[in-house]
Amino acid sequence: MGNTQPLRGFTTISYWAADLEAAKQWYTELLGSEPYFQRPGYCEFRIGDYQHELGIIDSKYAPFDTQSHSPAGALMYWHVDDVNATFERLLAMGAKQLEAPRERGEGFITASVVDPFGNILGIMYNAHYLEVLSTKKA
């Protein structure tokens, strides 16, 4: 592995949906863009400052039980500039509150919802993210 850290950066997060077409439409509305890649049972969006990948996969391909009707997946937070406004928009789009916006310390606010397909979607204002981003653009 040389001198690099073994976990070098986020590449793709996968969300699962029994109704792939509905999930694709929901995330297209949320993100304001169409998937850049599609194949039967899968679509993928490139999003954010680093063009991270968000894959939406037909739940029949999930390596775990998606029928439990409990939120599934890791809690990953996406940086947003306004947690409260984004949280309210997600609720208006049919997501269900998992955790209301909560300050975690100066410069850090988190919230999470369960999307209409059972996936946990975390949002966060993260001062560190903005610091790192500003060094990359300099």
Image (cartoon, grey):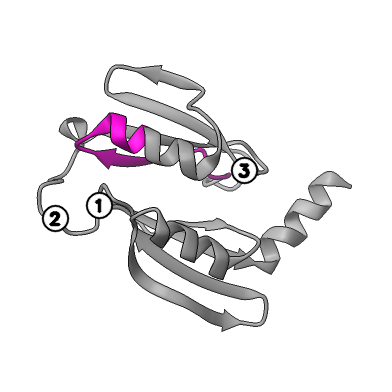
Residue nearest the viewer, comparing 22 with 108: 22
Residue nearest the viewer, comparing 32 with 103: 32
Say whether disc 1 or disc 2 marks the residue closer to the N-terminus.
2
* Residue 137 image point, x, y percent: 84, 45
Is the Cβ of the residue at disc 3 closer than 8 Å to that at disc 1? no
Is the Cβ of the residue at disc 1 closer than 8 Å to that at disc 2? yes
Identify which residue is drawn at 62% across, 39% down: 2
Q: Which residues are magenta?
A: 8-24
| Residue to which mark 2 is pinned | 69
- The answer for how far apart the CA atoms under marks 1 and 2 are is 7 Å
Residue nearest the viewer, comparing 36 with 64: 36
Q: Quadrant of the N terminus?
A: top right
Residue 20 to residue 106: above or below: above
Q: Residue 20 in magenta?
A: yes
The kind of residue tagged 2 is His
The kind of residue tagged 1 is Gly
Say whether disc 3 or disc 1 marks the residue closer to the N-terminus.
3
| Residue to which mark 3 is pinned | 48
Q: Indicate the secondary structure of the residue bearing disc 3.
A: loop
Please, which residue is most extreme toward the top here?
39
* Residue 57 image point, x, y percent: 30, 32
| Residue to which mark 1 is pinned | 118
Is the Cβ of the residue at disc 3 closer than 8 Å to that at disc 2? no
* Residue 13 image point, x, y percent: 42, 42
Residue 6 to residue 83: above or below: above
Q: Indicate the secondary structure of the residue bearing disc 1.
A: loop
